[in-house]
Image (cartoon, rainbow, N blue to C red):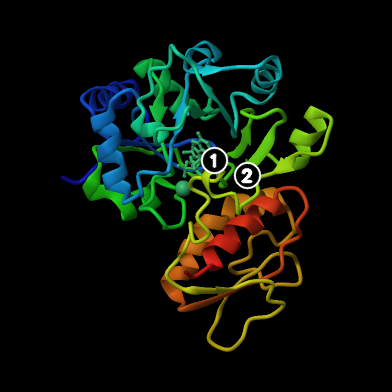
């Protein structure tokens, strides 16, 4: 079986929903990265999804919802969590909340936790699929576990075509970085993953600095594996210039224009290009040097992904 890559049409969306209803896997575009979706209420489907991704099953998934009403069925929202959702949804923010008694997402998708990660995506194709399906779709990034996240349908095809039912092609992802993850489980919100919404924007909205996840805390950090985004090539970070034989991922106008995340030094553009350029350099080089990226704004999430890509166990 090789998955068909189809543009979104009423027919392909209906077909995708049919595949999902019988427990199959569909890759869908979101504004962050492509997600590998299955029926979040169907534990057999979720088991197949973990299998296709080659993902350790202790790593819980994000449940994507069509509406605030669907979200409130799955999780308990405090007034602040609801206000945050109203402000940032639909969009690239994932909220971790206590699971609701009425929740339909299966235990396996939550890796047995009593919390759940929810996101209401902004991409029209993801929204159309969620509206058609009318139940939460759990979806990790549509790459084999440990690979670089996919930002085009072609990336998904390369990684997963022979393991899934269909790929909906919504073009390149506008944001290019995974969602920011914010936990509302404790007394105060905690940033679990820097991502497509700059931390400063969340802090401005909440009116205070955010606590960051303590990455040594283990149990609170499912999925924050250090070597999460490993390309095949080795990576050398903060490299002002490449050494002989190295590919060079540049940033800013003092770097060559080829393989440059953003010649104008625009971090949003750099985020959009990051995974596609990493994949491309990975095909051509054994060793990749990466220019310094400022730690401000989206630079925090970009540097987080680069550090994971550079890490070797
Ligand atoms: O932008 C995104 O978030 C993309 C698109 C497809 O939505 N999805 C994505 O999923 O990046 P994934 O599976 O690659 O990352 C989900 C992260 C993992 O780090 C996982 O550990 C965390 O969310 N997570 C899920 N449920 C959690 C929970 N209950 N508590 C803490 N972290 C959780
Ligand atoms: Mg991922």
Q: In the image, residue 234 lies at what x, y percent?
A: 50, 75
Q: Secondary structure at mark 1?
A: loop
Residue closest to the eye, 157 or 234: 234
Residue at position x 45%, y 32% in the image: 113
Q: Which residue is drawn at the image coordinates 30% and 40% (left, top)?
A: 49
User: Label 2 vs label 1: CA separation?
Assistant: 9 Å
Residue 20 in the image, given as x and y percentages of width and height? 27, 26
Residue 47 picture location, percent across and down: 27, 38
Q: On the image, numbered disc 1 is attached to which residue?
A: 32
Which percent across, then down, holds residue 151? 48, 48
52 on left or right of 235: left
Q: From the viewer's perspective, is 21 left or right of 202?
A: left
- Residue at 63% x, 35% y: name it: 182
Left or right, residue 250 beside residue 173: right
Which image quadrant for residue 302?
A: bottom right
Q: Nearer the viewer, residue 313 or 70?
A: 313
Q: Is 203 drawn above or below residue 130 in the view shown? A: below
Which label sits on residue 218?
none
Comes first in the chain, label 2 or label 1: 1
Nearest to viewer (mark 2 / mark 1): 2
**Residue 151 visible:** no
- The residue at which mark 2 appears reads as 195
Question: Up-down: is 211 above or below 43?
Answer: below
- Residue 295 drawn above or below residue 191: below
Q: Nearer the viewer, residue 194 or 169?
A: 194
Q: Any atom of ligand 1 within 8 Å of the CB at mark 1?
A: yes
Q: Is mark 2 within 8 Å of ligand 1?
A: yes
Asked whether disc 2 touches disc 1, contact meaning CB atoms under 8 Å apart, the reply is yes
Residue sticking out furthest to the bottom: 244
Q: Is residue 213 visible?
A: yes
Q: Report whether 202 appears left or right of 15.
A: right
């Amino acid at each position: 079986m090789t998955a068909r890559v189809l543009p979104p049409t009423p027919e392909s969306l209906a077909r995708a929903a049919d595949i999902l209803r019988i427990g199959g896997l569909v890759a869908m575009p979101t504004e962050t990265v492509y997600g590998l979706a299955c029926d979040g209420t169907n534990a057999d489907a979720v088991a197949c999804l973990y299998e296709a991704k080659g993902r350790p099953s202790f790593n819980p998934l994000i449940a994507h919802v069509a509406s605030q009403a669907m979200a409130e069925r799955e999780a308990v929202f405090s007034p602040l969590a609801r206000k945050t959702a109203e402000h940032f949804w639909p969009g690239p923010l994932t909220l971790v909340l206590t699971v609701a008694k009425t929740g339909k997402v299966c235990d396996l998708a939550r890796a047995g936790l009593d919390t759940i990660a929810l996101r209401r995506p902004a991409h029209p194709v993801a929204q159309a699929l969620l509206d058609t399906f009318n139940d939460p779709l759990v979806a990790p990034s549509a790459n084999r576990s440990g690979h670089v996240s996919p930002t085009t349908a072609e990336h998904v095809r390369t990684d997963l075509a022979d393991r899934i039912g269909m790929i909906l092609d919504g073009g390149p992802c506008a944001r290019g970085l995974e969602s920011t993850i914010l936990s509302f489980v404790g007394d105060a919100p905690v940033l679990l993953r820097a991502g497509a919404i700059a931390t400063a924007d969340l802090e401005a909205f909440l009116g205070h600095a955010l606590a960051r996840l303590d990455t040594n805390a283990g149990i609170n950090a499912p999925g924050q594996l250090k070597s999460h985004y490993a390309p095949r090539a080795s990576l050398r970070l903060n490299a002002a210039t490449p050494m002989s034989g190295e590919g060079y991922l540049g940033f800013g106008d003092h770097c060559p224009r080829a393989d440059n995340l953003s010649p104008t030094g625009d971090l949003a553009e750099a985020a959009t290009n990051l995974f596609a350029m990493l994949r491309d350099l990975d095909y051509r080089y054994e060793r990749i040097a990466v220019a310094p990226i400022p730690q401000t704004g989206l630079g925090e999430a970009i540097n987080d992904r680069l550090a994971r890509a550079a890490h070797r166990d």
